[in-house]
Image (tube, rainbow, N blue to C red):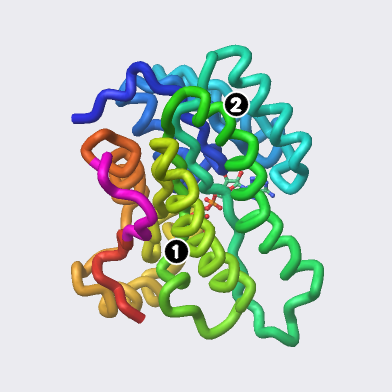
């Protein structure tokens, strides 16, 4: 349905879960795909597994909390491929503890990966997108960016910031033909969720009008759409992909 054959796509957090499925989706749509992961071993494993499925991708593992490392990696990619057309800021960590049981360091780490890293990757990529007369930046937000959650305050805090970053950067970059949007998944069946017992999942499903939890493909499809020319007049949007879950 989508053709990204002339496009170079960088996807952070691409070694598993939503990011890995998004890597597959863009690769199957013809893109040159570069995935980022947190460490060499997980990047190597993802690349090998993808190769076994007939999907050739490249991988890097810059420290996303270090602007210089991120910037050097982006420079390497541009010198190899000439341009970056689509950046998907997907890497993220969550939190569940009460405020008393959350250390200052844990809070800072969440903000560092879920928020600061978006600034670093985007800051590194934007000059090349401007030079190329356009581009797309997509961020992974969450349904908790709208409603908060009853514990683990750092996670929704970071995702509210993702939405603010998305809406503001969209306005700044629109004159340069760079669109910025976010996808806000509801609960999605990654490895962690898939391993939860039925007794925990069933009550959750009852709260979702569409009657199921999200599949990673649902989120990857939203990224494909928002990155495509079919979304050429959409920027600054936070697209909920959550089966209409509203709590
Ligand atoms: P996951 O844990 O399966 O994957 C997370 C990815 O982020 C991995 O590729 C990992 O390598 C990368 N990552 C983690 N820590 C990192 C670090 N310090 N440096 C660099 N990379 C790091 O998670 P997922 O469920 O696929 O989540 C992906 C995104 O979707 C996250 O931003 C998450 O907040 C968001 N999200 C997930 C759900 C859900 O139900 N799964 C719901 C809403 C939003």
The kind of secondary structure element at disc 2 is: strand
Q: What numbered label is drawn on residue 142?
A: 1
Image coordinates for residue 155, horizontal then vertical, percent: 58, 69
Disc 1 Cβ-to-ligand 1 distance below 8 Å? yes
* Magenta portion: prevailing SS class: loop
Query: Which label lies toward us, 2 or 1?
Result: 1
Q: Which residue is mark 2?
A: 59
Mark 1 crowdedness (10 Å alpha carbons): few <14, some 14-19, many ≥20: many
Quadrant assignment, res 120: top right
- Magenta residues, start to end: 231-239
Q: Check whether the beta carbons of the residues at disc 2 and disc 1 lie within 8 A of each other.
A: no
Q: Which residue is drawn at the image coordinates 64% and 35% (left, top)?
A: 124
Q: What numbered label is drawn on residue 117?
A: none
Q: Is residue 188 above or below residue 85?
A: below
Q: CA distance from mark 2 to mark 1?
A: 25 Å
Which residue is nearer to you in this view: 185 or 45? Answer: 185
The kind of secondary structure element at disc 1 is: loop
Image coordinates for residue 215, horizontal then vertical, percent: 32, 52
Q: Confirm whether residue 80 shows in the render.
A: yes
Q: Quadrant of the N terminus?
A: top left
Q: Is residue 247 magenta?
A: no
Q: Which residue is drawn at the image coordinates 34% and 38% (left, top)?
A: 227
Q: Which residue is drawn at the image coordinates 67% and 54% (left, top)?
A: 116
> Upstream in the sequence, badge 2 or badge 1?
2
Q: In the image, 29: left or right of 116? A: left
């Amino acid at each position: 349905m989508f053709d990204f054959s002339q496009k170079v796509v960088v996807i952070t957090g691409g070694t598993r879960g939503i990011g890995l499925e998004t890597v597959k989706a863009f690769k199957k749509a013809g893109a040159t795909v570069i995935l980022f992961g947190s460490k060499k071993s997980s990047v190597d494993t993802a690349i090998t597994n993808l190769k076994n499925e007939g999907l050739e991708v490249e991988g890097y593992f810059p420290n996303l909390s270090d602007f210089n490392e991120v910037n050097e990696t982006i420079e390497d990619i541009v010198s190899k491929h000439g341009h970056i057309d689509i950046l998907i800021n997907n890497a993220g960590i969550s939190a569940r503890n009460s405020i008393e049981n959350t250390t200052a360091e844990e809070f800072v780490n969440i903000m560092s990966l879920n928020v600061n890293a978006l600034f670093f990757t985007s800051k590194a990529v934007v000059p090349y997108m401007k030079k190329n007369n356009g581009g797309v930046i997509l961020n992974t937000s969450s349904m908790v960016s709208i409603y908060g959650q009853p514990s683990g305050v750092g996670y929704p805090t970071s995702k509210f910031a993702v939405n603010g970053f998305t809406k503001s950067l969209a306005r700044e970059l629109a004159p340069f033909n760079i669109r910025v949007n976010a996808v806000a998944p509801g609960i999605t069946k990654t490895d962690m969720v898939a391993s939860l017992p039925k007794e925990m999942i069933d009550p959750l499903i009852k709260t979702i009008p569409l009657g199921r939890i999200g599949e990673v493909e649902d989120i990857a499809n939203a990224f494909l759409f928002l990155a495509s020319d079919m979304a050429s007049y959409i920027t600054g949007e936070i697209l909920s992909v959550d089966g209409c879950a509203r709590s």
